[in-house]
Amino acid sequence: LMHYHLCDKDSIGPFVEGGNVAAETDAFKKVVDQVDEYRVESENLGRVLYQRAKAATNLSNSPQQKQQLLGDVTRLSRQLADQLSPMRNLQETLIVPAISRVV
């Protein structure tokens, strides 16, 4: 729904200042697509992180396996935080202002 409203020339046209509807809708599409890409990557990373964390608590794992898994959890947590930061930045600086113009 957000993709439709921010990327459709007919929907966004009345809200575009300066009259360059095509350029603005293309820009919105690129930003929304980038946020979607970050979301998919973050979801996949979160799934792996959850699996590693769950495995780290498995009592049948050796101490060495648990240590390796906990290291993975730490590394994946950092990766997820690093990945969420630019996504949040795009949302706060571009998506939210765009939505506020349409709403």
Image: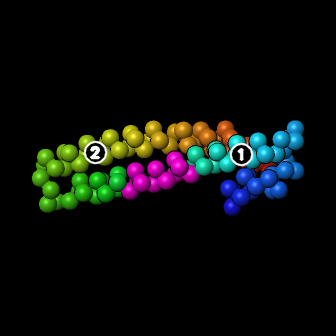
For the magenta stretch, what is the residue range? Answer: 36-47
Q: Is residue 43 above or below residue 26?
A: below
Does residue 96 show up?
Answer: no
In the rendered structure, the answer to whether residue 92 lies left or right of residue 20 reads left
- The residue wearing badge 1 is 26
Q: Nearer the viewer, mark 2 or mark 1?
A: 1
Q: Main secondary structure of the magenta part?
A: helix
Where is residue 40? Give x, y as percent.
Answer: 49, 53
**20 or 43, nearer to the observer:** 20
**24 or 86, nearer to the observer:** 24
Task: Report the residue at 87% width, 42% height from top.
Answer: 19
In the image, which disc is placed on residue 72?
2
Q: Indicate the secondary structure of the residue bearing disc 1.
A: helix
Q: Amino acid at mark 1?
A: Asp
Q: Earlier in the sequence, mark 2 or mark 1?
A: 1
Task: Report the residue at 16% width, 50% height from top.
Answer: 65
Decide whether residue 46 is among the magenta residues: yes
In the rendered structure, the answer to whether residue 41 lies left or right of residue 74 reads right
Q: Quadrant of the N terminus?
A: bottom right
Task: Report the residue at 19% width, 45% height from top.
Answer: 67
Task: State the count of labels.
Answer: 2
